[in-house]
Amino acid sequence: PANLDEMCGPASLATVDGFEQCSDGCELARCCSQPIEVCKVTNPTMCQQYKPCAVMLDGDAAGTVTSKISANSHPDAVSTQTQQKCNTAALMNGAGVAECKSFCDPALCCFAPDGEELDVEMEVSANGGNGGSSSWQSTSILGCATPDNAGWCGQYSACQSLFTVNDEGYMSDEVASNAVDVACNDLSTDAGMKQCGDMCSPAECCFTSASHCDDNGFGDIDCDHYNSCYEFFDLRTGPTAQQVLIPRPPASLETMCEGLKFNTAEGRQMC
């Protein structure tokens, strides 16, 4: 389509209808993003015309959505903004929590099945939406998550963190890490995988290489908060994956393996 840039722009993807229009417009070019890239090899010029479709997301069997884009390649994409505004490091104080809440407000219904009640905090304007001051109020909304809108909702996966933090923020690294621990404490069910995957979505770069987050514009993410995500990404990678996921080393590894400590059996075992 001639207006593909607009159809797949941030403003369009922020709405369910806009996301569906982008998805429909990109349908014919889905083969351009397949691993074997047959389309790119046989018809690179045509695939290039569908470049705006790179912002589309794919879901896996557990309903977890992963992005093909980064903060460097698409800084204004909904998924990029969600990961930047709602990762644990961004939620250490009240100002960060408020910014994440405002951005996630339209998609909070995504965190419960369609028709199921969900307790959330919504932003309410003092003037009925006509500008002026606003406040956050606890309320119940109906969930809207269905297989049909999984792609749109997936852009807001990182909003899962809002259900683990209060208005003042995590305040400490220990509390932030514990929030991730709790979100990922049960990976035996699809629901548990989904919850953990959403919580861990900003930190996928942490489990690729030491510099991958910085290289892709996500340098502000604190990977240490997401140590509990390793098992999730390992399970999602699967036993037949060509790339083996290597656990991140403990922060104290250098101290554990230094000098004379390695001369004793206990020291070698610890290292």
Image: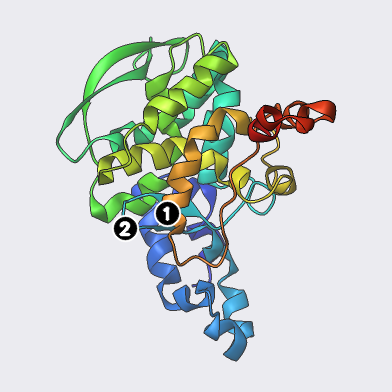
Q: What element carries label 1?
A: helix
Give the answer, above or below, for where 236 lies relative to 249.
Answer: below
The residue to which callout 2 is attached is 61
Answer with the quarter of the image where residue 57 lies. Answer: bottom left
Measuring 52% from the left and 20% from the top, which residue is drawn there?
Answer: 176
Mark 1 crowdedness (10 Å alpha carbons): few <14, some 14-19, many ≥20? some
- Residue 8, image x and y in percent? 50, 58
Residue 102 higher or lower than 124, as above or below: below
Real-space Cα separation, disc 2 to disc 1, in angstroms: 9 Å
Q: Which of 132 and 40 is in front in this view?
A: 40
Image location of residue 211, percent across then percent down: 74, 46
Q: Is mark 2 on a helix, strand or loop?
A: loop
Q: Is residue 180 left or right of residue 61?
A: right
Tell me the residue that label 1 is attached to.
Answer: 236
Colour scheme in the image?
rainbow
Q: Is residue 24 above or below residue 82?
A: below
Q: Residue at x 43, y 69 (%)?
A: 25
Q: Name which quarter of the figure residue 157 lies in.
A: top left
| Image-quadrant location for residue 187 | top left
Residue 235: x, y in percent?
A: 41, 51
User: Which label is found at residue 89?
Assistant: none
- Is any part of residue 76 visible from this angle? no
Q: For the view shown, which residue lies furthest in the right direction?
A: 259
Q: Which amino acid does label 2 sit on?
A: Ala
The residue under the point 37% across, 23% down is 163
The amino acid type, in three-letter code, at marker 1 is Arg
**Quarter of the image where the C terminus is located:** top right
Left or right: 89 as drawn, with respect to 194: right
Question: Which marked residue is nearer to the observer: mark 2 or mark 1?
Answer: 1
